[in-house]
Amino acid sequence: MNDQSPYVLDVDEISIAFGGLKAVQSFSMRIPRQGLYGLIGPNGAGKTTCFNLLTGVYRPDKGSVRVDGEPLTGLKPHQIAAKGLSRTFQNIRLFGELSVLDNVKLGSHLRGSHSLGGTVLRSAGYIGQERAIEDRAMDLLSIFNLAGRAQEQAKNLPYGDQRRLEIARALATEPKVLLLDEPAAGMNPQEKIELRTLIRQVRERFKVAILLIEHDMGVVMNLCEHITVLNFGETIARGTPEAVQNDPKVVEAYLGTE
């Protein structure tokens, strides 16, 4: 852990092109410890591509990504998650046939350390670790008001609960930075209000920095301390919610000009 830097996530000039299309150009961002930042832009602006670059789904053509001072560029997604960067997805990616509890336990296993031999022989160390993982998973489900549905198949949860389960599973990896890709998608107004409260509670309780992509401006403007705006893969504005929503370039990107 690099205690000298106030920034837990440091993204420096990452870019990627697909064929001749520059999908993301020289994207930079620094998020302080326990920061709550937003990434917005019109459809096709490059937001999810940025998340894919940060989490190892794509490798940037240039630039670097660091978490707590440790370089992530070139690592595989599971290695990046182990370094402390975890995410949810725009389209929910739970293991629908597995139980709610097992979905969260899968996240916790990233931090497990038992050997193949211990697993096969069900050693005391293996059994103790499995019990600890299950206890932690149940604690997370309690925080998200899902403990009562722990044994249900994940696919049977209502949509809003599936969203919350995906966040719980991401937190089970013990991240330093949590990326939320459209967490309010498909939610009704009341669920969105509850989501904002939940995200604030997650930040405080788990001491985690959060970066979210979101189309719902009400969620972003009421939640984020700092916002970066993308359009056609380029950063066109960054600053406080008030500054960003009054920026002429942002207004033009969303509304166009006469």
Image (cartoon, rainbow, N blue to C red):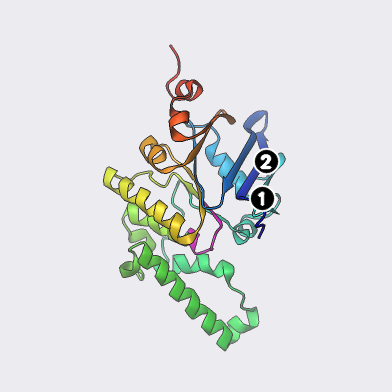
Q: Which residues are magenta?
A: 170-178
Specify whether residue 163 is in view: no
Quarter of the image where one finds residue 186: top left
Q: Provide the residue designation for mark 1.
A: 66
In the picture, which quadrant includes the N terminus?
Answer: bottom right
Q: Provide the residue designation for mark 2.
A: 12
Looking at the image, the residue that sits furthest to the top is 258
Question: Is 250 left or right of 189, judged from the image as shown?
Answer: right
Residue located at (42% from left, 37% from top): 215
**Image location of residue 70, percent across then percent down:** 69, 55
Q: Which one is in front, 77 or 243?
A: 243
Q: Are marks 1 and 2 in contact (CB under 8 Å)?
A: yes
Q: Is residue 176 magenta?
A: yes
Q: Tell me the SS state at disc 1.
A: strand
Specify whether residue 63 is in view: yes
User: Disc 1 to disc 2, how far (Cα)?
Assistant: 9 Å
**Image location of residue 73, percent across then percent down:** 70, 49
Question: Is 91 drawn above or below residue 247 in the view shown?
Answer: below
Residue located at (50% from left, 37% from top): 227
Question: Is 116 left or right of 42, judged from the image as shown?
Answer: right
**Image location of residue 182, percent across then percent down:** 44, 44
Question: Is 103 drawn above or below residue 240 in the view shown?
Answer: below
Counting the numbered discs, the total is 2
Question: Is 132 drawn above or below residue 142 in the view shown?
Answer: below
Question: Is 62 left or right of 123, judged from the image as shown?
Answer: right
In the picture, which quadrant includes the C terminus?
Answer: top left
